[in-house]
Image (cartoon, rainbow, N blue to C red):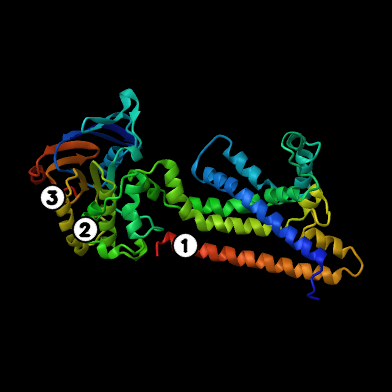
Amino acid sequence: MFDISPTEWTAILLSLRVAIIATLVATPFGIALAWLLARRDFWGKSVVDALIHLPLVLPPVVTGYLLLLTFGRRGLVGAWLADHLGIVFAFRWTGAALACGVMSFPLLVRPMRLSIEAIDRRLEQAAGTLGAEPWRVFATITLPLALPGVLAGMVLGFAKAIGEFGATITFVSNIPGETQTISSAIYSLIQTPDGDTAALRLVIVSIVIAMSALIASEWFARRATQRLHGN
Amino acid sequence: MLRVDVTKKLGEFTLQASFTSEGRVTGLFGASGAGKTSLINMIAGLLRPDRGSIVIDGETLDDTAHRIHVPAHRRRIGYVFQDARLFPHLDVRQNLDYGRRMNRLADDPAQRARVTDLLDIGSLLDRRPGRLSGGERQRVALGRALLSKPRLLLLDEPLGSLDEGRKVEILPYLVRLRDEANVPMVYVSHDAAEMRQLATQIVMLRNGLVTAFGGVKVLSSAVSPV
C-alpha cells in the first residue's frame, strides 16, 4: 500500500515544483497588488479587484481555456513569447505553473491585503517623521509587520496550487513527467482498472500536503497577532 | 525661529493660526478640539495647509503661494505622539536607532549614551515595546525622536495617555530635556500646570484661532480651558 511507484513520485515531485514556482513568482505581484488595493484609491480599482477574484468563481475549465487561447502556441501572448523570448507554456510544466499561479492568486492576495490593511498607519507616519522615505517606510515598517500575512498568503496559494486540476488539465493536458501533477495522476488512475490503490496513495499524499500547509498558515496567523502586539 | 501662518478647513472647523516663536519651548495651549494637533501635524508635514506658510530658521517648509510643501521625511522635525507609536516589531534599541539609520547619519555612541542616560532607558534596550509600561514607552519615544537629530521637536500631549502618578514620573525628564538637549520644542497640552513648568512661550488656541500669545503669564489671564 505505501510503496510509492516511480511514476507516482514523478507526479508528486512535479506537483511540488509547479506549486513552489507558481507561489514564488506570484508573491511579488501579490504583495504589490495587495498594497495597491489596501492603500490606494485609483480609477478602476473595483475592476482590478474583480479580475483577481475571477478565477475563484469561473469554472476552472474556462480559465484553462482562456489561458490556452492567450498563452497557447497560437495565442496572442503565447506566440509572441515563443517567437521573441523562446518561452513556451503550452503542454509544458511551466504552463502548469502559470495555470496554478493564476488559479491560486486570489487566495494568495487576500491574506496579504488583510494584513496590510490591519497595520496602524500612524506607525508609518511616525517612521516618516523620523526621516524614512516612503519606500523605506514600506521596507522597514509595512512589510515586516505584514510578513505573517504575506507568508500565510503564500502557504494558502501553495496549497491551492498543489490541488489545482481543471485549469491545468485544460491548458497543458495530462502528460506524465511533464504536466501530470498529483491531481491529474489521480484522475488517470481512477479511470484505469486496478488503479484504485495507487489513486488512494496519492489521495493520502495530497491530504498530508494540504493539511501541513493549512497548519503552517494557522501558525503564521498566530505569529502575526503576537507581532502586532509587540511582545 | 518658527514662523507659522496657516489656514486649514477640516470639515466644519476652520483653523487659522499665525504666530512667531523664538522660545526654547513653545507651548500650544488649548482645550481639546481647539486645533492643537492639526496645527502641529502641519508643522510636521503630516497635514497640508490650505493656505499660508511655515518657516523654520529661514527655511520655508510650506508656502502655498509658491506651491512649496516639504514632505515630512525631509523636514528633520522630531515628533513625540501622545500614543508613543513605537514600532512593535523592533526592540527598544532598534527603535532608538531607527531615525539615525533612516537619515543615514553616522553612528554616534556618545550621543546615544547621553540620551539613554537622560531618559533612564538603558535597562530597557533589549525589550519589545509590548513589554514596556506607558511611561517607559513615552520615554523611549522621546529618545527615538531626539536621536534622529531633529532641528525641532514636537510633543503632542506626551503625558496625555498617562495617569497622574506616571505624569509626575515623566515630567522631570521633559524639564531635563528642555534644559540639556538643546533642541527647540513645541509642546502641546491642555494642562496649565504642565505648561507653567515647561513652556517658555505660550500660544493659546481656541476654536481654531490664536487668542493670546506671550510669556507664561498669559496662562493666568486665561480661563481654564478644560
In the image, what residue type sits under mark 1?
Thr
- Can the viewer see residue B30 in this picture? no
Q: How far from the left and from the top, in percent, is residue A217? A: 58, 63
Residue at image mark 3 = B179
Indicate the quadrant containing the N terminus of chain B: top left, top right, bottom left or bottom right. top left
Left or right, A7 with respect to A48, comes to right
Local secondary structure at mark 2: helix
The residue lying toward the viewer, choosing from B16 and A128, is A128
Q: How far from the left and from the top, in percent, is residue B52? A: 28, 28
Question: Is mark 2 in CB contact (under 8 Å) with mark 1?
Answer: no
- Can the viewer see residue B42 in this picture? yes
Per the rendering, the mark at residue B119 is 2
Residue at image mark 1 = A225
Residue beneath the point at 78% across and 53% down: A166
Q: How far from the left and from the top, in percent, is residue A107? A: 63, 54
Question: Is mark 3 in CB contact (under 8 Å) with mark 2?
Answer: no
Q: Mark 2: give few (<14), some (14-19) or many (20+) Cα within 10 Å.
A: many
Q: CA distance from mark 3 to mark 2?
A: 13 Å
Task: Tell me where residue B170 sits by quadrant.
Answer: bottom left
Left or right, A7 with respect to B20, comes to right
Labels 3 and 2 share a subunit: yes
Name the N-terminal-most of marks 3 and 2. 2
